[in-house]
Image (spheres, rainbow, N blue to C red):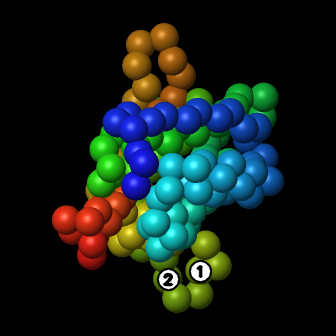
């Protein structure tokens, strides 16, 4: 892979349902440029989609507030996705019943990501950032 240490991209999206799809398109282009392995890129697409969808659906904030997406490659073996919104309520994994049509997003994130979490944004910023990390395969460890 031709990954440079700490490659970072950032995008802003309106808090609208179509933003998850737009974020996926931008991410897949970036993953191709970074030469992220296809299997890892597909998993990262699911993670990104869930985090952006949650920010669009559950962030109780004015419609004019944007959602920030930041994707980082801090090393050749790790991809980090961060999604920020203006709502300070931290996300909680809930137990969806078999009849529920939604509510499994964070369960999916917890199952697919190497690690994940959320924190309030720093001083001077509204809301929170929800993040996840995904181990990427490397020649020394091809099964990550």
Residue depicted at x 39% and y 38%: 4
Q: Is the Cβ of the residue at disc 2 closer than 8 Å to that at disc 1?
A: yes
Residue depicted at x 64% and y 79%: 101
Give the alpha-carbon distance from disc 2 to disc 1, as whole Å.
5 Å
Residue highlighted by disc 2:
97
The answer to whether 77 is drawn above or below residue 65 in the figure is: below
Residue highlighted by disc 1:
100
Q: Secondary structure at mark 1?
A: loop
Q: Nearer the viewer, residue 33 or 41?
A: 33
Q: Secondary structure at mark 2?
A: loop
Q: In the image, 116: left or right of 103?
A: left
**Quarter of the view holding residue 144:** bottom left
**Quarter of the view holding residue 53:** bottom right
Label 1 environment density (alpha carbons within 10 Å; few <14, some 14–19, many ≥20):
few
Q: Residue furthest top?
A: 124
Number of numbered discs visible in the structure rendering: 2
């Amino acid at each position: 892979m031709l990954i440079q240490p700490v490659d970072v991209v950032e995008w802003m999206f309106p808090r609208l349902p179509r933003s998850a799809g737009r974020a996926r398109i931008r991410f897949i282009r970036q993953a191709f440029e970074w030469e992220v392995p296809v299997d890892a890129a597909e998993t990262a697409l699911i993670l990104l989609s869930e985090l952006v969808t949650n920010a669009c659906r559950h962030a109780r904030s004015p419609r004019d507030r944007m959602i920030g997406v930041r994707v980082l490659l801090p090393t050749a073996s790790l991809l980090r996705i961060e999604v920020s919104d203006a709502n300070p309520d931290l996300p909680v994994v809930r137990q969806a019943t078999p009849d529920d049509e939604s509510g499994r997003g964070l369960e999916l994130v917890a199952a697919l990501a190497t690690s994940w979490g959320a924190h309030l944004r720093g001083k001077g910023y509204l809301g929170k950032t929800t993040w996840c990390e995904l181990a990427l395969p490397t020649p020394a460890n091809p099964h990550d």
